[in-house]
Image (cartoon, rainbow, N blue to C red):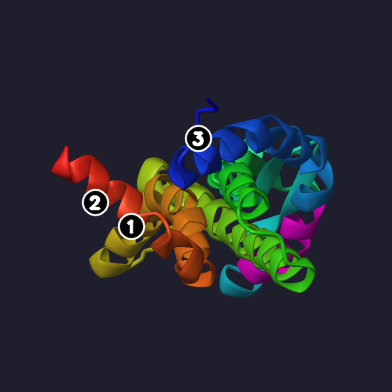
Amino acid sequence: MTMQINPLTAFIIKVFLCLPLCYWGWYYFADLTTWIVISVAEPLLQSVFPKLIIGIEQSGSLVEVIAEVTVPAQNTPRGMVAELPIPVNPLIYSYGLPLGLALTLASPFSFFRTLGVIFINLFLFLLIQVWGIGFESTKVLFLQMSPELIGNIRLPSWQMDCIALGYQFGVLILPAVTPVIIWVVFYQSFIVRFTPVLLRKNRL
């Protein structure tokens, strides 16, 4: 007598089998995705803070946001400006991407739908990384640095609160919630199949 595995258990097993491959791909292509993120984040930050942000430098999957800071003239050689590198790891803002890919690959396969959902996951997580770089660098500059170092640039208190909220939202909420929301939106009919299984368990 063969033992049948219920659909929910089979799906969970598929997700766990897909996760190692998805994590490997996420890390293997991290340098490329970081380069794409920088190409968006750098002009964006420079347009918002043109006199403060010099640029963004990449080292593998890590980046440094370079800010021009104000220091006493005697401490800066003639013809040079004082630069402050702010290290940021964009991967901490995309740790949910492998889960999103694993959920998609473990769901019923349809070439165009599967490819489309994978693309949507990649696109949204690139935007989340841009969000993370922007808010983490501004958090360091405006909430952790002395105002004298950033040319006495003062922001209203509500903008400071928005920076703190944006940073927390980007590092704690978006990476964890985004893959689940995408999966639920695009696989509602598949998720409904699990309802009888869950109802049986509740009766037990």
Q: Residue at x 42, y 54 (%)?
A: 177
Q: Amino acid at mark 3?
A: Gln
Percent coordinates x, y for residue 68 in the rendering: 64, 52
Give the side of residue 200 with respect to residue 10, left or right: left
Percent coordinates x, y for residue 122 in the rendering: 69, 59
Percent coordinates x, y for residue 19 in the rendering: 64, 35
Q: Amino acid at mark 1?
A: Thr
- In the depicted structure, whether residue 33 falls above or below residue 131: above
Dominant secondary-structure state across the stretch colored magenta: helix
**Is residue 106 in view from this perspective?**
yes
Residues in magenta, as a range: 35-45
Percent coordinates x, y for residue 40 in the rendering: 72, 66
Q: Which residue is mark 1?
A: 195
Q: Which residue is mark 2?
A: 199
Label 3 and label 1: CA atoms lie apart by: 17 Å
Helix, strand or loop for disc 1: helix
- In the depicted structure, whether residue 48 falls above or below residue 180: below
| Label 2–label 1 contact, CB within 8 A | yes
Q: Residue at x 73, y 67 (%)?
A: 110
Give the side of residue 151 with respect to residue 110, left or right: left
Query: Which residue occupies the foreground of this view, 202 or 23?
Result: 202
Q: Which residue is mark 3?
A: 4
* The stretch drawn in magenta includes residue 36: yes
* The stretch drawn in magenta includes residue 12: no
Query: Which residue occupies the foreground of this view, 77 or 138?
Result: 138
- Looking at the image, the residue that sits furthest to the front is 1
